[in-house]
Image (tube, rainbow, N blue to C red):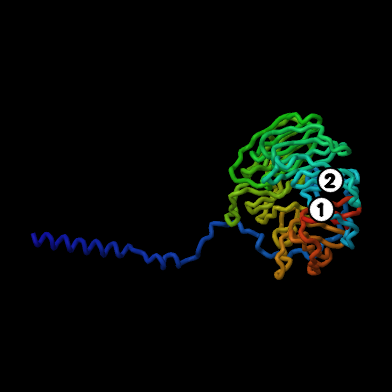
Amino acid sequence: MKYSIFLIFIFILISCKKNDENLVDLEFFTNQGKKINLNTHQNLNNKDITSIKSLKNQEYFTYKDWSQKNQNMNNLIQAINFDFNKKKAHIKTNIQNFIFYKNKIITINEKSNIIIFDSNFKKINSKKIYKRKIYNNYNLKFSIFADAGKLYISNNLGEVLCINIETLQVIWKKNFGVPFRSQIKLYKGNLYLVNSNSKIYSVNVDNGELNWSFETSSQYLKDDKSYQIAIYDNKLFFTNDSSEIYCLDLNSVKIIWSLSFENKNFNNDSLIFKASPITIDRNGNLFVSTNNGYTYNLDLNSGQTKWSVPIYSLNRFLLTRKYLINTDKNKIIIINKKNGNVLLNKKISNKKKLFFKDVVLGKEKIYLFDVNGYLVSINKKNFGNISIKKNFKEYNSYIFYKNSFYVNTSYSIEKF
């Protein structure tokens, strides 16, 4: 019996020794060799790039109207023959959106007040759409569009309205039940807009009747920037909150193609999908940037990616013949339109906290608008020549109309 117990003891010792030989020091193992990073897609937003130091003279465009927030159907903003000088006029007012239509400034605020001014801020007419009990404890958001003497309004109450611009009388009003989140577009007698369930609507401009609707997948978490929309050459392009972009043929009302923006850049993993306004140039090149970390050039007819680059901005692109110009936080970004090469990614200041919302390409300078009211001017012939001035209390948006530049702040509209 004692002999058997001794043999069992010896066996256990031998087994433990063998196991010890197979044990690995965890700290030694994890510290040896080269660490492999699974994210092979480098994020260029945080990388300084200076492959271009100036811009040559651009082709300038004169805007004779500004009937919607992003100016036109394809959200295309180009260089303007203008440079900032002294302020010509201003009016103290707090508005949410403003557009220019036939020499009239049409504004709307979060309390549903429509106020119309002439180009020098003389008040022409005003009207309140909703009584306070409708929006009490609720922030109203509007998208507006002017055409053929009518003002079209969509909002986050799920309503679409048509109003006579001269009299401000309601021509028709329709309630579709779910908040609208995209900008409103008008094309060939129909309104197009996307609601918070990622559903695209076509509405008749004459009576507000629904022509058709098309529902896409939707997520619980969403943002206004999830829903972008553009129209070009009888094609409707829109994004939804499920990280998708669709192309519809407006003649046949059929899907031509759809694309899912896969999140390949793990450094920019976000629960809520957001996109820049879809921008289409005069040659039919479609550009869009998303918070999955990429900017894309997509083929209009097939949806195939012509190029993608791991840099992004959720602001609206400004386009020249050769370049995409945009901003991200405190940086200016310039991308080659043809191949997607990032030519400039430049931080403007290490001293001031800047967060850019818009970029304007003027005659002599590039202008960057910061949300807190700083105006950054960059000399087009020498990107090292930068001026930073506090011009506004806060900044919301701009309009360029003929030879004048209008800036909407949280406290005023200012004319330059």
| Mark 1 in CB contact with mark 2 (< 8 angstroms) | yes
Residue 322, label in figure:
none
x, y (%) of residue 368? 78, 60
x, y (%) of residue 393? 78, 61
Q: Which of 70 and 290 is in front in this view?
A: 70
- Note whether residue 10 is visible: yes
Mark toward the start of the polypeptide (1 vs 2): 1
| Label 1: how many Cα within 10 Å (few below 14, some 14–19, many 20+) | some
| Label 2: how many Cα within 10 Å (few below 14, some 14–19, many 20+) | many
x, y (%) of residue 292? 63, 51
Residue occupying image coordinates x 81% and y 50%: 77
- Note whether residue 307 is visible: no
Tell me the kind of residue under disc 2: Ile
x, y (%) of residue 76? 80, 48
Q: Split into 4 quadrants, where in the image is the C terminus?
A: bottom right
Residue 115, label in figure:
2
Residue occupying image coordinates x 66% and y 63%: 47
Residue 93, label in figure:
1
Numbered disc 1: secondary structure: loop
